[in-house]
Image (spheres, rainbow, N blue to C red):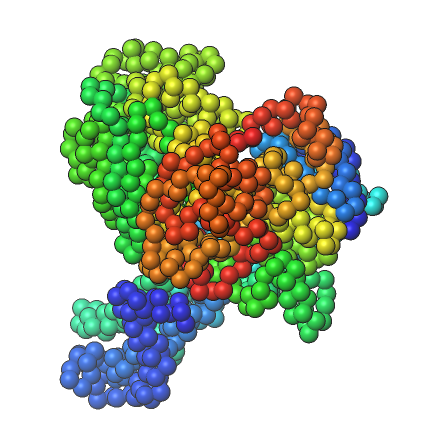
Amino acid sequence: MSTLRFENITVRFGSVTAVNDVTLEVPNGAVVGLVGESGSGKTTLARAAVGLAPMQVGRVLLDGVPVSRHGPARQLQMVFQDPYSSLDPRMRIGDTIAEALPEVARAEREGQVNRLLELVHLNPARAKDYPARLSGGQRQRVAIARALAARPAVLVADEITSALDVSIQGSILNLVRTLQRELGLTMLFISHNLAVLRYVAQRVAVMKDGGIVEEGPTAQVLGTPRDPYTKELLAAIPGR
Amino acid sequence: MDSLKRVLRTPLGVGALSMLGLVFLLAIFAPLLWGEAASETDTAHLLAPPSAEHWVGTDSLGRDLWLRTLVATRLTVLLALGATALGVLLGILLGSAPALLGRRIGRFVTAAVNILVAFPGLLLCLFFAVIFGVGEVGAVFAIGLAGAPTFARLCHTLVAGVQERDFVTASRIAGRSRAYVLFKHILPNIAEPLVVQATIGAGSCLLTFSGLSFLGLGVQSPAFDWGRLMNEGLNRIYLNPLAALAPGLLVITAGLAFNLTGEAIARAFNVETSGSWVTATAAARTAARKVPAAFSAANTVPREVLRVTDLQVGFPGSNPVRGVSFDLRPGEALGIVGESGAGKSLTGLAIAQLIEPPGQVDGEITFLGMPLRPDGGEDQRKLLGTSMALIFQDPMSSFNPARRIGEQLAEISRVHQGMNRRAAWERAVDRLRAVRISDPQRRAGQHPFEFSGGMRQRAMIGMGLMAAPKLLIADEPTTSLDVTVQQQVLDLIDSVREEEQVALILISHDLTLVAERCERILVMYAGRVVEDIPASALAVAQHPYTRLLLAAVPTLATDLDSPLAVIPGSQPDPSTQFSGCAFAPRCPLADDICRTREPLLRNAIPPIDDTRKKPGLGITLKTSRMRLELNLGGKPGSPVHTGQVACWHKGEPLPAPTLIDDDLPDETLAGVGR
């Protein structure tokens, strides 16, 4: 695992500036939460990191080394919002995970897949199942296992609990925390929910209109917010 | 094999496949059985008319035309299949080129394909036939090449659809090559429509090939296919019409066999993509969107606005709502919460009489003193249209995109209240102002797309308020909105409710949100109300499901050192037959009673007095929420649960959340799907 650094990133789509001169650091072994409304640019920033959105200006650095600006970068892996779209319905989940493994011998592959399934608390016997046999929470676990299979330096999680039913969101958040503790994961965790970020992230960055308006340790940002927008976000959480 | 079975399940499938089977049997065996007889010349019977010996007559060399027609099946089918294979292969190659070669080169290929598609297929075919010269190989190439652009276009569209999906992106991020992604992910996922199209394509190739041969451009003597036979028979069409008609009939039969098979496959796969229950819900939702709503009849005001008794909603093969009862007082705010599939939205739609066949609603619904029936007459329609307002999750689909917002609001007053155009418009502007839309005069003249999501949702509420409804049913009204906008919309609903004394049913998956806005909450699970609880008493909820739901979602007060509660497994499918409590497979308290007898809604157990603490009940709850611990102690001033609970173990302490997982054995997950 290593430190991920966004340096003066600007992403434009035509005349629309989605991300405007953003600099953000995800320190080694930490979970940094990124919060903001839809359209604030948080997903675009994540996609820029893994090479899915074109950056006009700026660099993404891993331990000071620029990540390839063209095409996907293997050291950064992403977990998507909707586990019903992120798993190939025609592929057994074991094969889905295996395809993200770096080149390994066929014999070794099964062991690796089993280990990854256990890591995300799924029964290794499920490797032979197709996604249709799995619940939403289980699918999201498979998606996390696939991302981990590539041995990424940094994991980017984009709203990974938003598409799940309330009753199983907790289990995915628990898993993220366990993994972070056990593997020392470096993670950029995107969510629109501050309470979720409070639970998993050590630092929080608040994004608005393509820029970061506030960044700092979670307790500080949530406890004594400086930016009016952060205050507004906090005030909007139901059941405070 | 499974898909073959599915095709064979319909009469169309059986018919089409047996026809196709017959054609293939002929193609295989006819030349073996009658090959020699068909080329035997019989100088005694040159150009004979049909007879018992020669059913279709003979040709100029005295060969039996019926046998020749049967024998020609092989060549005809082979050539058609060859041309199809060529077209499909080229089509897939061209269609997936953008995915394989990247955007820039892909764009050229796509443009070229688009130009080729613009040419009529027959023109291309004749063009290639001329280039490749007369003969069967030339014709195969001509027809194959001519069919390729259409197939390429289809393939390209399908590929583009799958390429958007996250699993393709994930595979690319994992470092897989474009070719790998194409063969491993994209092609398997578009195989079904391709197979359908190829089958239908084979039918039209057969027709085209016969056409070319008939024109003399295809198969040449001494070889013969059906087109060739028709060509030869045409000269004597007045003397022996059967000589041309027999091969013609076989062309039609074989063409139909291919086409119908394709059709049957397509239908079989469609059945899979939309299960009956999902379609039913979707249909109900679409129906719901068509009906905006509302203003007031307000002549009689009974004690309760709404009384629902034993409401059931059924679809063929499933029962998503299984007996829901509740009352609603004027101005009361009731929340209905549950996971997706719990039946909460269908309950709302059933109350508004928006469940359409094959859905069936049972039970009693009394709204403002009037019993509502699915076949209710004009009076009921008027009452619903004027006193009940509905707000849905997606306001964009609730508005007609082509008409101004103001007109759409005004229309309700003009139709239901008989207002004139000007008065109705002014009313619309006034209502937009009431839902805090700034500059309402100008905004009323705008179209829905000029409104932001939050504004559209406000306008939708404004539409419901064209007069003063007595009941507002809001189904996930803020789910697609951002947190801050969400709060504004809910504030607006609150103030409307207070000012106009409107009762509210707020349907949501978010327990904390509902608790903040409603006085009473119905927690639904698998089509039933499992707990009916005052919002203020949520902290002392007695159903394990309610308590776990609360503990499963982090709040700003969640203890950071302990894991969140987890409800393993998932909600049973509405088609499941229950014995016992539907929640039992996921419940940490479940025992044999729970698994065999379904608990009914009964009064919640009264709060425990500190001084007479019964053993076993006074144990504090060690969940991630501190509040639970305090409240169960029965301290003075603590919230009291005056509602009802359906649980054999209501109020019993739950085990502390550990890192359990939602990986359950298969039997509990059987029938679970989305």
Residue displayed at 74% across by 47% down = A186
Q: Left or right of B289: which side holds A189?
A: right
Can residue B397 be seen by looking at this rendering?
A: no
Residue displayed at 18% across by 30% down = B370
Residue with the most extreme right position: A64
Can residue A175 be seen by looking at this rendering?
A: yes
Instruction: Provide residue B398's location: percent of width, then percent of height.
Output: 37, 31
Q: Left or right of B140: which side holds A53?
A: right
Residue displayed at 73% across by 57% down = A151
- Quadrant in the picture for residue B259: bottom left
Q: Relative to the observer, which residue lies in front, A238 or B96?
A: A238
Q: Left or right of A235: which side holds B313?
A: left
Instruction: Provide residue B574's location: percent of width, then percent of height.
Output: 35, 53
Instruction: Provide residue B518's location: percent of width, then percent of height.
Output: 42, 30
Instruction: Provide residue A209's location: percent of width, then percent of height.
Output: 64, 27
Q: Relative to the observer, which residue lies in front, B224 or A237?
A: A237
Q: Relative to the observer, which residue lies in front, A102 or B298?
A: B298
